[in-house]
Amino acid sequence: MKVQNTKASAMSKRTLTLVLAMAVFLLSALILRVSLTNGFSVDVKTVNFVTDESVNMGGTLWVPSNATAETPAAGIVVAPGGNTPHAFYSSYCIELARRGYVVFAYDYYGTVGSGMTMEGSSGAVAAMKYLAGLKFVDSDRLGATGHSNGGAQASAAILSEYAASAAARSVAFIGCGIPGEDLSVYDGVNVMAIWGLLDECGQGVFWDVYHQDSLNYAGMADLAGVPKNAMETGKYYGNPADGSLRVLYTPNTFHSLSNIAGSSVSSLIKYFDDTLGGNVTALADNSFIYVWQEITVLFIALSICIMIFPMGSILLETKVFEPLKRPLPEEAAKGSLKHWIFLFLPGIISAMLVKSTVIQGQTILGKLPKLFNVQSTNGFIWWFFLSALVGIVFYFIGNLADSSANSQADKLRLQTSVSNICLAVLFSLAVVGVPYLFAVFAERICGWYGRIFQTYFAAIPSGRIGQYIIYYIMFLILFTIYAFLQTESVRIKGTSPRVQYLILLIMNALPAIIFLGLLYGKLVFTHVTPINGREMSRAQGAMMGMLLLYPVIAGVVKKFYHKTANIYVAAAINAALITWLSVNTPQLMV
């Protein structure tokens, strides 16, 4: 009877956790919709259309109530940065729209649901054509913004034939230099730049070696017609009425935060108000609601992650998945100095591999684009593979160095059958499938999705299902290796489950912690960025994305191995989750 009561209590806790996670999700989705629409006063539409390049373009259109055929409003195209969905730029999309601008933010070709082609300036020209052709957009007042690699797209949009005849044209470049060698193309176009003082991607572009000491004003100074050393930040040069305005802002922010920082958003609002005159409200430049959007997308993502744990626990109690359970062996690991060295040294070595292997993997796997078509995932999975090899080498060395190592117990953990692996795969898809359906639901009712910084809990476009299967198999193999190496090694005699989870988390996150710690530490303390090329930029992006997910990955391994003593169960769940987040939005290869 006592055992039954204990099981019933555990089940009620799981159910309660699942219900609470769902409730947080739904409440966050409602608040998200309110913030996206400025209290339902702005019409927010999901847009899909076929461009002149014969591929689909997806995006979001914000239409304020003042924008009608009789009273058309100024229009602004928002171009995203490299490998980044347009959702990352909702901060100023929301704020501009609630002040009276029609805003179209699009996913450039090859990302999210937009088709892939090398033509049309990544979709920028098609985006401007679409916006300028709307009957409630004033085609005489057009603007464009571009962050990072999106700067070139913003330039192409504002210089395209679809904006060329506008009486007022304005462009804003955020976290990027002034695109183009011939700056005379910007004659008649107002130009703004936002260059963060800690922008790790700006060295050699708009910063010299020491950021604060040697700001390279060259591009903006040339446009403004003043000497480089005479350029002042925040000062208006020229006249917005004839398209000669040039202004530069240098907020104290990093590259990926330059579009979220309040000072950047308020500067953008002021700039477009002064050049396009689209603000029909009395809202101040620093009156914001976009922070609610940032909070709610985080809570949506967190609630989705939390759902995995009670969902998995509930499913394990069903007869279908009962065969996945095995007896949990007694804790056998000893917390000796040698053991700690072998736990963490592989992570330190893996951190040293990050810089070269991420872009190396994009090159190697990129030679088979029909199989491995997601560029950024190729880089991470190659590093993940090499890190697994490092772990295997240390495993064998450790067994040779430790005469008490129980290799027979390790063989038993590896033993399985094809049917058991298939059942683990089915279980993982069911466990992750429920949160995935909630994510799809969020997109349907909000036109938006959960996000943890630059990790997006978006639905997988139908054209990427094949890629999901391929990458799932690869991640399943690699997560199985990691589960085998880590599950018993962290179960040190006399330690609590929480301590074991913490050890597991540090083991997984250590390479990212070391790599990013050294990178940003150098940037903050010396103002010299180690991100001085594509190699480091790709490596930084891969490590940052995974660092934010390692608490979930470690939690899955700890919880589901404890429940099933089956390494394939934990590996399959992590593979299902990480594959989803790895193939849904990143840029595809040609």
Image (cartoon, rainbow, N blue to C red):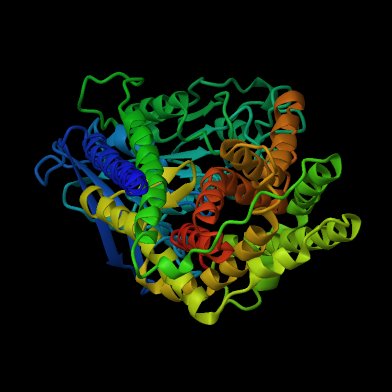
Q: In this view, does 414 lie above or below 65?
A: below
> How far from the left and from the top, in percent, is residue 251?
55, 24
Q: Farthest residue toward the left?
A: 70
Rendered-image quadrant of the C terminus? bottom right
Q: Can residue 175 be seen in this view?
A: yes
**409 or 504: nearer the viewer:** 409
Please provide percent x and percent y for residue 448: 31, 48
Residue at horizontal 66 percent and vertical 34 percent from the top: 218
Viewer-nearest residue: 225 or 250 = 250
**Residue farthest to the right?**
401
Numbered circles on residues, count: 0
- Pick the front one: 519 or 262: 519
Whether residue 319 is situated above or below residue 397 in the rendered picture: below
Location of residue 459 by image quarter: bottom left
Could you say where residue 3 lies in the image, as x and y percent from the top left? 37, 48
Q: Which quadrant holds residue 362?
A: bottom right
Q: Position of residue 283 (x, y in %)?
A: 25, 21
Q: Which residue appears at 25% of the width and 34% of the height?
A: 35
Residue 511 located left or right of residue 249: right
Residue at 55%, 63% in the rendered image: 566
Relative to residue 380, is residue 463 drawn left or right? left
**Residue at position x 47%, y 57% from top?**
581
The quarter holding residue 485 reads bottom right
Residue 511 placement, left or right of 48:
right
Q: Can residue 132 be seen in this view?
A: no
